[in-house]
Amino acid sequence: MQIKALYLKDFRNYKEEIAHFSPEVNIIFGKNGQGKTNLLEAIYFLITGRSFRTSYIKDLIAFEKKGFYLEAHFEKAKITQTLKILYSKQEKKIFLNQTPIPNFSSLFGILNGVVLSPLGSGLIDGPPSVRRQFFDISLSQSTPLYLHHLRRYTRALKQRNALLKIKQLHSIEAFEEQMAYSALYLQQTRQQMIEKLVQLARPIQEILSSKEEALQLIYKTSLSKTQTTEAYLTQLEKNRQKELALGYTLTGPHRDDILIQIQGKEALSFASEGQKRIGVTSLTLANWERLRQVNHELPLFCIDDLGIFLDHKREEALYQFLPTLGQVFVTTPRAFKSTHLLVIENGKIMSDDHSNGEDDL
């Protein structure tokens, strides 16, 4: 899988630009505030229908513009395809080739990829919702049935919470049945992914930490591993009176968390900043590898602000992975010789170099 070209119009600080990419390592070079990360954000939006920097899509619209347009020409399974997204406050249109796509969730699985960003520290430092989102996005890229159950559960949960807030229990059982149908599948699939990620992340963690720091993930869920659908329904019924007073649901996959441990201690409380960054890097690389194995193709790999995350020694260790990752997009304030160098200045691509010079990475 590779993106050959990306057209941006009124996206962040890009008025109208087109970028051509190498199938290998693409270095996106420029000073801070020039639009390097915005380019990665556009790629990630094409993959997931969301940003890795903001929860509000309207923030992606250029200042004083009504909407933005993205168009990617990419190759998948040796077939060249086109993905187009038009978004404004009034409408959104998505097309894969000439076929309309109904919503942003339907983008999952068209392009696959991961992003390693300084903002990724929230995977350890952030609230449980950040860790749940990490798993939900990855599983939605690789498992269409997971996305189906996630959407089904989320819709039913919203309806149940709405009834709890207005203290109206009429028809609440119907939404609880929908939740129970999907809750156990979500929990079991997350547990399987955790076990796979630990298996894949441990050797990566050893390389990045010089075999000094073991990584472990523990799934913290309100549902027991042996719980049945009927038992979950009983639990929801038992909690109703308490939840009526609170106005929201206390039990289910939407309350789960994933504890990240390094050297047997909870990373959130005991790990140094360097250890946290190594942990996030290892999990991101492991996630890329899991997607590769499940989808049988090389996912895209985006790295924002190369070198911000790791000290020089760990950064050098990270470099050895890059040639194995297929198409890579790296933003950096430092110049590198590379397969393909894009120089970004004030939202403009000043240099689009397709030279095959020796890669200093």
Image: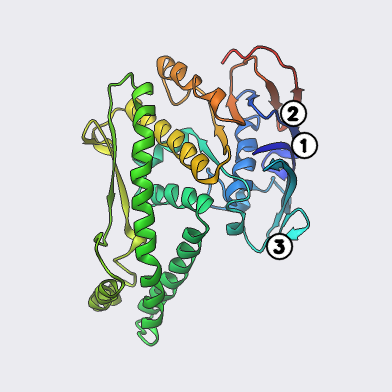
Frontmost residue, 25 versus 309: 25
Q: Is residue 42 toward the left or the right of residue 219 in the image?
A: right
Residue 354, placed above or below residue 281: above
Name the spot of residue 33 as percent of width and height, x first.
Answer: 61, 30
Name the spot of residue 129 as percent of width and height, x first.
Answer: 39, 52
Could you say which disc has been placed on residue 91 in the image?
3
Q: Specify how the rendered protein is coloured.
A: rainbow
Q: Residue at x 38, y 62 (%)?
A: 185
Q: Residue at x 44, y 70 (%)?
A: 158
Marks 3 and 2, Cα distance to the nearest angstrom? 29 Å
Q: Say few, some or many: other residues with alpha carbon within 10 Å of mark 1 (under 14 / 14 to 19 / 20 or more).
A: some
Q: Which residue is drawn at 59% across and 17% down?
A: 334
Could you say which disc has been placed on residue 17 in the image?
1
First-in-chain label (3 vs 2): 3
**Type of the residue with mark 2:** Ile
Name the spot of residue 295 as percent of width and height, x first.
Answer: 54, 45
Q: Say few, some or many: other residues with alpha carbon within 10 Å of mark 2 (under 14 / 14 to 19 / 20 or more).
A: many
Marks 1 and 2, Cα distance to the nearest angstrom? 7 Å
Frontmost residue, 270 versus 315: 315
**Type of the residue with mark 1:** Glu
Residue 327, placed above or below residue 30: below
Q: Is residue 206 toward the left or the right of residue 10 in the image?
A: left
Q: Which residue is drawn at 41% across and 48% down?
A: 130
First-in-chain label (3 vs 1): 1
Q: Name the residue under label 2.
A: 349
Secondary structure state at the residue bearing disc 1: strand
Quadrant in the picture for the C terminus: top right
Instruction: Mark 1 and mark 2 in contact? Answer it, CB < 8 Å.
Output: yes
